[in-house]
Amino acid sequence: MKHTHDGMFVTRISSPHGRLARCAFAPLAVAVFTALALAALVGLGAATPVRAAAQLKDVEFCWAQDAIASLVDEGIIAGYPDGTFKPENPVTRAEFAKMMARAFAIRPTGEPRFRDIKSNWGKAYITALTEAGIVSGYPDGTFKPDRHITRAEMVTMLVRAVKLADKMDSLEQPMPSFEDVGPGHWAFRAVETAHSLGILPVHFGVVFEPDVATTRAETAWMVKSLIDLKITEGKLARVDTREGLLTVTTPGNTDQTVTVGLDTQIYRNSVATSLDRLLRGDGVYVVADATGEPKFIKAKGLVTKDDVTTKVSILSKGTLAPSDVEALARGDWNSVKDGLQPRLVERLVERGLTEEEATSLINQNWNELGDLAKKRLADALSAELGISADLVTAVLNQDWKLAKTYGEIEVAQYLLAKILNL
């Protein structure tokens, strides 16, 4: 008998998705079913969850033993009927959806959105997590529930579960924590967020291997670490910038004090900011690690001038500092020109202009810019046609006399080269 989702997650005996339930049609089958059910109740932890965790015979020396035992005891994951957990086995996307739905008590309210899950045992869990914005499918409209979930996919879903996957802009790009997941990787932000939260296994080291299938042990460890995060949500009541303290009034009208650390990332209206820019009355969402140290603070409130200038600065990729944006908004170009010019020249050169063209553009020297642009065109045509740039320039300037001279030189050089080659 094969075990797919039943081996990974606790399945009720009465569940229409359980493979054993379909065996109860004849007296003999009922007897077999009853015996297997009793064994499963002990092995999977439905009746005696505390003992079930202790009875898993292949996790005693597993690095994720505590996380596995905790989740088994809570009925979130389970072992196989033979008393094993198989910690190194990979996890499917459907199995992970079920695990997350159980861990965070997420219930489906709509119909399946993916065409390949309508007859899948995990469609309710997949639908629930889709509605919660935690999982997503592929561009072709499928979810691929039986495909092994990769580390990058799983970490992205975990970060979404704690509402840290939305856009958060910052002037400072974090240095990659892993050699194989750089800023250009689609999961870079999620991986860095998960690393900051401390929910990644230590054995990943400096190589993340984003496309490797996630094992059952790694899954258990990361989900348990996510559950252990401390989240505070409410309205900002007070800010003590000297002591680095926030007082947040929770929905239950209880005040909680949050101590901001040196590595706490603070965002207001999705833009990176500092503690002193937070305003009383802002909606606040704080995510702290298992020790209670805040790692992310997200605030939302009325849009201020600081929000706008920082956002524009970010859109310019740091070319314009927030103070430059303010000055330009006032029409005060002269106050920023000298300090801004080197950065603008560098950016324009990156865009393909020469340094001379960039300087002319910034200084609004249109005549010189025209000559420089013409020279670039001449150089490009020269390389394409195999003739001298001087001849192309003469033609562009409609200097036919000079063009004739350069043309004669070209012909003479061509004939001479042919003769010498003979």
Image (cartoon, rainbow, N blue to C red):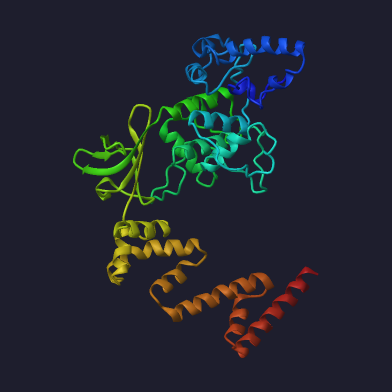
Position of the N terminus by quadrant = top right
Viewer-nearest residue: 58 or 133: 133
What is the total number of numbered labels drawn onto the structure image?
Answer: 0
- Which residue appears farthest toward the bottom when viewing the image? 401
Residue 197: where, in percent of width, then height?
41, 33
* Residue at 33% from the left image edge and 60% from the top image edge: 309
Does the image show residue 77? yes
Res. 208 image quadrant: top right
Residue 321 in sight from this viewpoint:
no
* Residue at the (53%, 32%) spot, across then down: 101
What x and y, as percent, mark residue 279? 26, 50
Q: Residue at x 52, y 40 (%)?
A: 134
Residue farthest to the right, as pictured: 422
Drawn side of residue 400 relative to residue 344, left or right: right
Q: Quadrant of residue 43?
A: top right
Looking at the picture, tell me which residue is in the foreground, 34 or 84: 34
Give above or below for 364 relative to 138: below
Q: Of all residues shown, which one is farthest toward the left?
A: 242
The quarter of the picture where the C terminus appears is bottom right
Location of residue 352 with respect to 82 vertically, above or below: below
Report x, y in % for residue 324: 31, 63
Q: Is residue 310 left or right of residue 74?
A: left
Q: Say which quarter of the image contains residue 121.
A: top right
Residue 198 locus on image (x, y percent): 42, 30
